[in-house]
Image (spheres, rainbow, N blue to C red):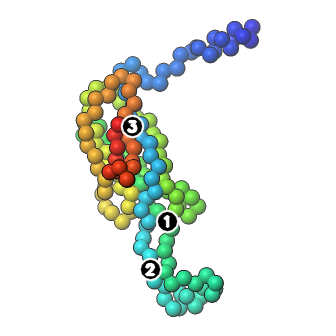
Amino acid sequence: MFALLLGYFSTSPRYRNLEPDQALLRLSFTHPGKIVSDCRRRTTEELAKIPANMRQSMDCPRERSPVRVRVELDGAPLYDDAFAPAGLKRDGASAAYRRLPIAAGEHRLRVQFNDDARVAGFNFERSEVVHALPGQVVLIDFIEDQGGILIR
């Protein structure tokens, strides 16, 4: 009896990742945002308050900017969110993984990134026409060494 139940539930009910007429945009990246502020020189009064073994003339923050992402499909906003940096001191990389189902077909895709809190708007942008077949996954990634936003 157990074997019959196991056999049935290993194939049923059928799992459908997407509807038959849908494709998927997958936003997936890990990227450290820029440092929030520049280093500054400590005053002599500030240095006097710090124990001698910890005195450094420069105060450099570790906190990183959140990474903001906006995705537009055919001129309409599809997704807009900011991803906080990891770590207790907010000094790690921001990581994102989002699944965005879309209708299959030809679409104008525009992706914008901002990884610097000191910059208004977006400092990376990419637009292109994608031909998404039913069941196809279109990946949106960010690799700064390869020009920033990648759509594959």
Q: CA distance from mark 2 to mark 3?
A: 40 Å
C-beta proximity under 8 Å, tags 2 and 3:
no
State which mark lies toward you, 1 or 3.
3
Q: CA distance from mark 1 to mark 2?
A: 14 Å
Label 3 sits on residue: 139
Name the secondary structure under disc 1: loop
How crowded pointer 1 is (Cα within 10 Å; few <14, some 14-19, many 20+) is rated as some
The answer to whether residue 62 is visible is yes
- Image coords of residue 62 (percent x, y): 51, 68
Q: CA distance from mark 1 to mark 3?
A: 29 Å
Image quadrant containing the C terminus:
top left
For residue 56, side relative to residue 128 (left or right): right
For residue 144, side relative to residue 127 (left or right): right
Q: Residue at x 56, y 15 (%)?
A: 13
Q: Quadrant of residue 151?
A: top left
Q: Is residue 138 above or below residue 61?
A: above
Q: Is residue 116 above or below residue 2?
A: below
Q: Is residue 40 above or below residue 94?
A: below
Label 1 sits on residue: 63
Three-letter code, disc 3: Leu
